[in-house]
Image (cartoon, grey):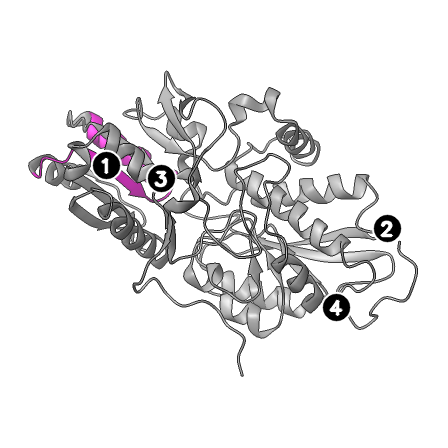
Amino acid sequence: MPEGAYPEDTKGVTAETIKIGVISDKAGPVKLPTVGIEESTEAFVAFCNSLGGINGRTLELTTYDSMIGAHAEATKKACNDDIFALVGSGSVLETGAQQMVDCKLVEVGAYSASAAKSLSDRVYTPVPGPANQYGTGPCEYLAEKHPEAVKKAAILYGDIPAASNRAKLIIQACEEVGFEYTYDKVTPIITNDFGPFVSEMESEGVEYVSAISAVSETTKLLLSMSDQGFEPEVIDLGQQYYDPELAAATGAEGALVLTNTAPFEEVDDVPALQVYLKWLEEVAPDVEPTSLGVQAFSAGLLFAEAAASLGNDLTRENLLKALSEIHEWDGGGLHYPTDPGANDASGCFLYLRVQGGEFVREFPDEGFECDPDSVKTYEGDFGEGAKEQG
């Protein structure tokens, strides 16, 4: 530990420890993309402590279950507990975003699903996804490869603000590079019968299908498409679908899936990914690794780098300043390069394709395809960020 006094009034910090918390959805009626985030943060804590902690201080982790609809309650608990910061967090409904800012917590999250979090004064993530920015690289790639299909595009999204706002942003961004959305539909959070939606897409002549929902819901959509013999030219799915359940689903063959993290299939070539998998296996051997889990681990590393730079001047406001000054980050190779300090979206992407029940690299041939100029800021009602009051 560095010599000198430390701020003894800093919540969650002692001479020997730093107490942090993680909020994530642990339970719910459908399989959630946040499953594994908590365990990935535990893996980071174990890894960090194995190296001596942060400037000699051991990390202690408190976990909170936001249970989809209980994010505000989980945040209230975190605000009242003796913790320094939230690290690795990620929930589907981020209803406690303003509450977290009001109690002056700092969050280095795995990801942010809402405008309230992604544009917040006190939230940083290793892979920023601000609600008003989008990198059009994937849209440009598909418009070039499938110029006619993207003019008959469909997008379906779950009936929650994070999904609908994301859909609005994607539609606006991709239409500027040649997409035409002829089918734009909100679906219930849990849908037992996608048949009517599939029939409507068929009647509209849809050739490109995208979805923003839980994996378990989209697998039902793909099954219904298969049952009805509906075979659009392109099925284009986001990062949350990089999941073995999706790859094994009936109707998923040939689907494209984005990832911003290094593919698990290439672990032999990515030492940082080997570290994540080793420590996840150490603390939670029954938990499958996920790309959002990788982001949670990277969030821990980002927190550690910022906190370590402060020595004994470990206060929340100093942590925010240190985070704001980190402008080059890839978690040691866990994901594409980002600028967390500026909270800017990345112009990088990587497409995988479902083939024979597995994920295989589609584009580019190696690494990530990156074009900083593809990132644009859009005007629209995507929601407001949680801000300091007064």
Return the x and y of residue 163 as percentages of the image width and height.
34, 52
Instruction: Report the residue that reaches farthest toward the left.
Output: 203
Tell me the quarter of the image containing the C terminus. bottom right
* Disc 1: CA contacts within 10 A as few (<14), some (14-19) or many (>=20): many
Which residue lies under the disc numbered 2? 56
Amino acid type for the residue under numbered disc 3? Gly
Which residue lies under the disc numbered 3? 137
Q: Is residue 6 magenta?
A: no
User: What's the distance in space between the residues labelled 2 and 4, CA to CA?
Assistant: 18 Å
- Answer with mark 3 or mark 1, whichever residue precedes in sequence: 3
Amino acid type for the residue under numbered disc 4? Lys
User: What's the distance in space between the residues labelled 1 and 4, CA to CA?
Assistant: 48 Å
Which residue lies under the disc numbered 4? 11
Range shown magenta: 204-226
Tell me the quarter of the image containing the N terminus. bottom right
Q: Nearer the viewer, mark 2 or mark 3?
A: 3
- Answer with mark 2 or mark 1, whichever residue precedes in sequence: 2
Q: Nearer the viewer, mark 3 or mark 4?
A: 3
Q: Secondary structure at mark 1?
A: strand
